[in-house]
Amino acid sequence: MLWDALTLQLGYNATLVTLGAAMLGVGAGATGTYLYLGKRALVSDAISHATLPGVVLGFMVMVALGGEGRFLPGLMLGAALSAVLGLLAVTWLTTRTRLHEDAAIGAVLSVFFGFGVVLLTVVQVMDAGRQAGLETFLLGATAGMLRDEALTIAAGGVVVLALVRLLHRPMILVAFDPDYAVGQGMRLARVDLAMMGLALAITVTGLKVVGLVLIVALLIIPPVAARFWSERAGHVVMIAGAVGGVAGYLGAAFSATAPDLPTGPLIVLAAFALFVLSLLMAPGRGVLAAALRHLRFQRRVHLRQGLLALAAGQPVYEPLTLRLMRRAGLARADGVATEAGRAMAARARLDERRWQILRSDPAFEAAAARYDGLTPLDEVLTGDQIAALDRRLGPEGAV
Amino acid sequence: MPLELVGTRPAPNTDSPLSIRGLTVSYGEKPAVFSVDVNFHPSQMTAIVGPNGAGKSTLLKAALGIIRPLSGQVTSLGRPLQERRAQIAYVPQRASVDWDFPARVLDVVMMGLARELGLLGRVRASHRARAMACLDRVGMQGFAHRQIGQLSGGQQQRVFLARALAQEADLYLLDEPFAGVDAATEKAIIAVLHGLRAEGKTVIAVHHDLATVAEYFDRVFLINTTAIAEGPVAEVFTPDHLQAAYGGRLALAQMGGAAAG
Amino acid sequence: MGQDFVMLSLAPLLIGIAAGVACALPGNFLLLRRQALIGDAISHVVLPGIVAGFLVTGMVATGPMMLGAAAAALVAVILIEAIRRLGRIEPGAAMGVVFTAMFAGGVLLLEQSAASGVHLDVQHALYGNLESLIWLDGYGWGALTDPAALAGLPPELGRMVAVLICTTLFIAVLWRPLVIATFDEGFARAMGIPTAILGLALVAVAALAAVAAFDAVGSIIVIAMFICPPASARLMTDRLGRQVAWSVGFATLSAVLGYVLAGYGPLWLGYDNAVSAAGMIATVSGVILGGAALWGPRRRSVSRAGATPQPSAPAE
């Protein structure tokens, strides 16, 4: 059954939902990257929670006009309008008062949501039956999704992607260094507007599938996961899109296999799984790789310090240094240096003295900049140059 | 030179108010401070100088335990630094603080008395008087009830110094106290620091301006990731040392000024 | 009217006020430390906590659910910190990753448990049911001095007041180190103040308030109480002590006004039913914030650059 779901053999509806969710994920991952790189990831939380009053008001307006309250584009329009108000409120609070952005986001998030809840309870008593449709926006539900709704969602994802492609350069510049962007003549307000608009579009599109509480996950988790794999902003955007797409696909496919498996949470958990994988396994910034590098680095530092201490006739007293030196065969169990230890200590001392001479000589300025306490001199100078330096060593001389 | 038995602890330098052994600090993979050994002299004013990124602030913060070093030992008068915190006053860089914080000048100076007051101690008139006296010493007593965000850079620096004075410590550690302050503030601060030295206190300051080291300080500690030299200013400011620290043309230019001063 | 009030409104009002103030107190410091959104994170993880509590014990009772919520808050804070350090991720994103994933897990578990027949009300967890916390034994004002009647008070009231006392004590006793560590962390550590533990304790106290309050006002509204009253207070004064006092006042006002408007507002407008009290409380706190942002005496950011201010008395 799972295999069928993954290979899109569970029927037209399921296939549509799966592909639509995947498209949404790609768009969300890509869009969220700009917010994340600009250190504004949680603005999406404010946007998503601010949609609630708009959704309910949209419902109420449509019912008042005699229509079917559940008309998705109408609800999405309402959501978009109140989210825009929320964004404006965040900006207003941040620029016109001494409050910081996190406070503004939290305030807008909770107040708009609270107001939306008030409206929900109003609707609850207006028409008890029809209201059930609105609560699915909180947590999402794809069971019984209409074909048109699925197509709308997929289309939303595609449109967002196209806009991302178009606006990538200005958005990246503004996310990274807004002051520089302004200096380059970019209109900060417009680019911000574009970024927020895209986030808004994703939020509104994804309301039905994932629900407003969880859509923020699709805007945050894929970029964070993607960041582990690349140092280039453009690549991060693409990887984030891929992560989002895979998460959308997997989550929707999973949920199609059983009636009581909700789509939204499964998509989010799939994204989280990919995040954990990236956190641990990514070769550059991943935890395992970093831990290994750190251990190696720590070892180098302690050994170097221990050898220098030995060569200067000072005792080594840090337990970790001692342990590492014993393990490397440079010192014996009782703390006395071994043959190898003495030799290496002398070599380290020589290296250090050569570095001191080099750093004092203006002719070697460029090389001197590479001094960090650990790099051996023969990685920086040629044999001839080192020989020239040695001639200037004092009576202690080379060993 | 014979190689010593390893594993024995060196006798702590019981005279030095700040003694650092084998301190290494790194952010990521590059050491900012590598294997620094230095004993600061008591009752003197010592400047810590070096090029940008040389690890001066890092050294201070790691010594105080504000950031975690990769290795190293820090003692004060032979005891671990933690035991002597009551006698040590720290003046951080101004930029480390959000000056929008809801506090007045007097409130900030009173923070220096926090250790004495403990958690629940009542603030008495005598405490306030002492805080005002510290403000007076830095020339800021007229600003006691001013909001800190309304102060200029130099005024903020003086308030920080007043806070440290309120601690009535033996050792004063300052991180770039003269950076970005006006000339009047600089003179005022130096007067206070010299006053502290006259009282027998130890002053150690990260200093950004080579040209004024000889004029303001007795000793200097030159650092560029590793320790280069420590001692009286004239002894440390030699062409070799300055070259090792600063490299290139800067050293040549400064040597004219510093070695002469 | 008096009798109805005591039975139907007194307890919910007091609970609402206690919840609001218990959240606003630590909220002042969270705001100054730019950790306002930790309330967002805590509120979202309360749901998986109560679901886990229910699944583990099999009971839809307050005890296990609150323990579950507390445990979830703890797990969340630990995970956020771990992810932040291990991945060198900025705090906001780390929070977003953790609380959305945990919330998703909670919803998933919830659907699974619904299949087993017992129904946990998600909406209740999200926005509470303050209006239902009535005092059936409250026959009138006299019931306040009647021990038998007092025993019938809703348990949420006792819990909330106890937590309020805890948070008040925490803030009062640890006031000095909290202020110093929030203002200047380097200086605080140099003085020997354990800033890391202090920060953790603050978050723990906030989580305690959130967990206790969610039962009454739901988890999402708790965020409003963490942020809006302190933020409004911040715009009213430059003194921290007064800011905390203002925040308590604003929290109380939001609770009272919100409850009254939710309960009686529709009646005044000619409708029969009440609307969500919690939602209205959040809305009122937002309106207060809006007012403070428009007219608060200290709403503007203090400018630092520019002319040197002169002292009030000749000094130099």
Image (cartoon, rainbow, N blue to C red):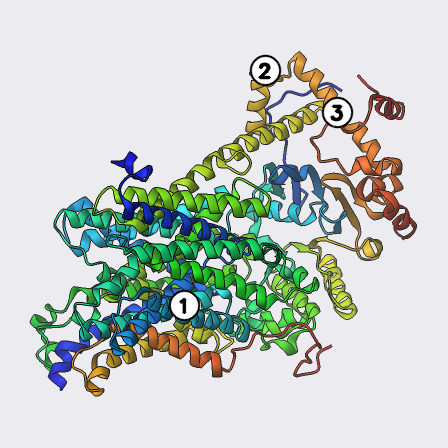
Query: Quick check: do tags 1 and 2 share a chain?
Result: yes
Residue B50 position in % (x across, y down): 76, 47
Residue toward you, C280 or A398: C280
Upstream in sequence: badge 3 or badge 2: 2
Q: Amino acid at mark 1?
A: Ala
Numbered circle sitting on residue A188: none
The chain that hosts pointer 3 is A
Q: Is residue B250 visible?
A: yes
- Give the camera-side residue of B170 and C52: C52
Q: Are marks 1 and 3 in contact (CB under 8 Å)?
A: no
* The label number, if any, that marks residue A332 in the structure image: 2
Q: Does residue C275 appear left or right of residue B112 in this picture?
A: left
User: Which chain hosts label 2?
Assistant: A
Cα–Cα gap, marks 1 and 3: 68 Å
Identify the mark at residue A80; answer none if there is no mark: 1
Disc 3 residue crowd, few under 14, some 14–19, many 20+, Cα 10 Å? many
Other-residue count near label 2 (Cα within 10 Å), few / some / many at <14 / 14–19 / ≥20: some
Provide the secondary structure element on which disc 1 rests.
helix
Q: Helix, strand or loop at disc 3?
A: helix
Spatial separation of the CA atoms under disc 3 and disc 2: 20 Å
Q: Position of residue A168 (x, y in %)?
A: 58, 54
Question: Quadrant location of residue A345?
Answer: top right
- In depth, the one of A148 and A184 nearer the eye is A148
Q: Amino acid at mark 2?
A: Arg
Alpha-carbon span between mark 1 and mark 2: 72 Å
Q: Earlier in the sequence, mark 1 or mark 2?
A: 1
Please tell me whether residue C28 is drawn above or below residue A372 in the rendered image: below
Q: Looking at the image, is mark 3 or mark 2 nearer the viewer?
A: 3
Label 3 sits on residue: A349
- Kindly indicate whether the residue at mark 2 contacts the one at mark 3 (C-beta within 8 angstroms): no
The nearer-to-camera label among 1 and 2 is: 1
Lateral position of residue B3 relative to residue A14, left or right: right
